[in-house]
Image (cartoon, grey):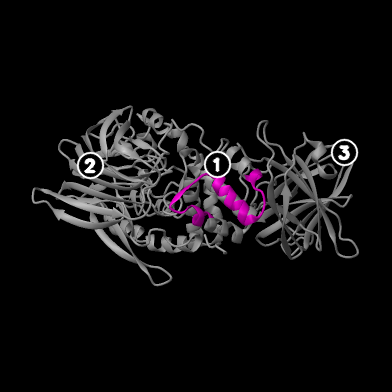
Amino acid sequence: MKLFNILFIILISITAWSQEAEQTNIPCKPLAKMASHYDQLAKASLRVGGGDWDVHYYDLNIDIDIATEIIHGTVEVHLTSDISSLENIQLDLSDLLTVDSVYLGGVDFNHASNILNITLDGSYGIDDPAVVGVAYHGHPLESGFQAFEFGTQNGIPMISTLSEPYGARTWWPCKDVPTDKADSVRIGITVDDALTAVSNGLLISEIDNLDGTKTWDWKHKYPIATYLVSLAITEYEYWDDTFYFADGDSMLLEYWMYPNYAIESNIARWNLTGDMIEIFNAAYGDYPFSNEKYGMAQFGWGGAMEHQTCSSMGNSGENTIAHELAHQWWGDLVTCSDFHHIWINEGFATYSEAIYWGAKNGEDAYHTHMAYKDRDYYGSIYRNNLSDVWEIFDYIVYGKGAWVLHMLRHVMGDDTFFETLAQYRDTYQFSHASTEDFQAVAEAVWGQDMEWFFNQWIYGSGKPDYRWWWSATQQNDFGATEIRIHIDQIQEKGIPIFKMPIDLRFEGNGFDTTMVIWDSLKSQDFTINLDFPPNTVAFDEQIWIHKLALQVVGLDDPEYLPEAFHLLEAFPNPFNRGITIPYAVSSHFEGELSIFDLKGAQVHSCRLSHSESGQYSVRWNGIDDHGQPLPSSIYIAQINSRGNQAVTQKISLIK
């Protein structure tokens, strides 16, 4: 599968709902609202237990009193036992909510420390079904970790939820872990009849209760993690569209936007969703919830959230729309097993932004977008501390997570990489996966051990810092030229030595070729034979490796100088009237500075002779050896030694 069509981050026109240029380096989750009360929720989430039964279906009804900000709810939990004698179950539920009763298969309960312990009406054997009901009420947790929010928009009530990672328990009793997805869920929402209530799946009914309220009945018939169940309730401007799959099947696209934001530019941006689905269908296989819908509903938070089949949108730039849509595959269809591995969700969705821009604007756009994601990520992507929301959703899981996939693509090659994603989807769809699960799929598809890759990029820290040089012999009688490449990894102490493939692009005399070398040592030499003498060698020109800026060899490192000379950075570059070309040499240096055009023709040269080591320079005014001014173009500056070695760099003449 060749998917190189991809971004230039475009400027979004100024509208009532977008900044002039969308920020692409911020997490999509509103972390500032998620910090308070987090330790308490995280402690409950890390409890031992819950693996002795399997949830199949939630039937959730919520009656919302906007004036008092109190919800009254009932939940039926349909489950089967995984042990020979199941006599009680534990549900996650915030202590801020009051349990009124348990019923059906529940006969008694104890509610403390955000855990609802329910005694069953008997002992259930393996695979025996049971149904437990819970009635409850209260004001959901709204301060700090706002899993449930009462707010307003333009003076109109706005009620919304965002439950990742541990917030579902703050507004309904559930088994709040990503490893046990319910097979389906029904959500009934009773609220003021002036408002529209939006949730997952398809709208089954809209009932006027003739008392100033309506009940909106939504049903989602796919496996779903609890944190992806959502509500978004306010007055909305609604429109829909139809997406057609390649086989002729169709799917509903639904949009709910605040009326005062429903201007032409915002609507047009949301309407790009169909094009995005087509791109991701080609990359990842068809949209996974095609029997229902994909929708977007504006809500009261900053950022956005990938609620299954209906993303909640605060920020609504084009980049964010693509990110949340991609989550339907990576995060919703395949969910991280726990939040140690949150990069399985966020890194994949962030990388998908580059896939989208590349498909839309071409290969250069893909690389440009990845460059925007390049930072000095020194920590591990694996999240050790799950008690701190800032730790879980540190930007490293987004940006470096995306770079892991970008690099893996280059390591494996396009066809194998996208086959790996397809196999990963097929193996873990409607379920959950860890880093090790993804690694196992990659190894099976590629046919090689990849422990080295995942250890250094997921669990390790830092990135390589390369220092390198090259030299070339003169062509022999058969036209061959021997190229010597020397590479050092000089990263600071504590950062490991990295194993990575490095692209080297050789240009000269009308020839252009790229070769790949595998570098894995602190200091390594390579010999490459070409059938032409190169004028330039580019190191990882397309930037496939997450690395520090390439370092040039300085005078304080004479042992690294090829034949004890080096070409330093020319300035100003580009130039108009003249350019200074500095270089460093050891003592008793004899050589030549030459300037070539892009066809490989020499246009200027001068002899170099130095008895003392040091740094020198040559000034060139853009005139050839015949005294004629040269046209605007890119030229190649090259220093040759009498030992037949050479170093080069590009310079640009602009008139």
- Which quarter of the image is occupied by the C terminus? bottom right
Residue pointed to by mark 1 = 375
Q: Is residue 429 left or right of residue 195?
A: right
In depth, the one of 225 and 276 nearer the eye is: 225
Residue extending furthest toward the bottom: 248
Quadrant housing residue 35 = top left
Per the model, the C-alpha gap separating discs 3 and 2 is 86 Å
Residue pointed to by mark 3: 587
| Amino acid residing under circle 2 | Thr
- Name the residue tied to disc 2: 74
Q: Which residues are magenta?
A: 424-453
Label number found at residue 293: none
3 or 2: tag closer to the N-terminus: 2
- Calculate the distance from the C-alpha at mark 1 to the C-alpha at mark 2: 47 Å
Can residue 403 be seen by looking at this rendering? Answer: no
Q: Quadrant of residue 244?
A: bottom left
| Residue 145: image location, x then y, percent | 34, 34
Asked if residue 333 can be seen in this view, the reply is yes
Dot 2: element: strand
The Cα–Cα distance between marks 1 and 3, rounded to whole angstroms, is 40 Å
* 646 inside magenta stretch: no
In the depicted view, which residue is nearer to us: 1 or 190?
Answer: 190
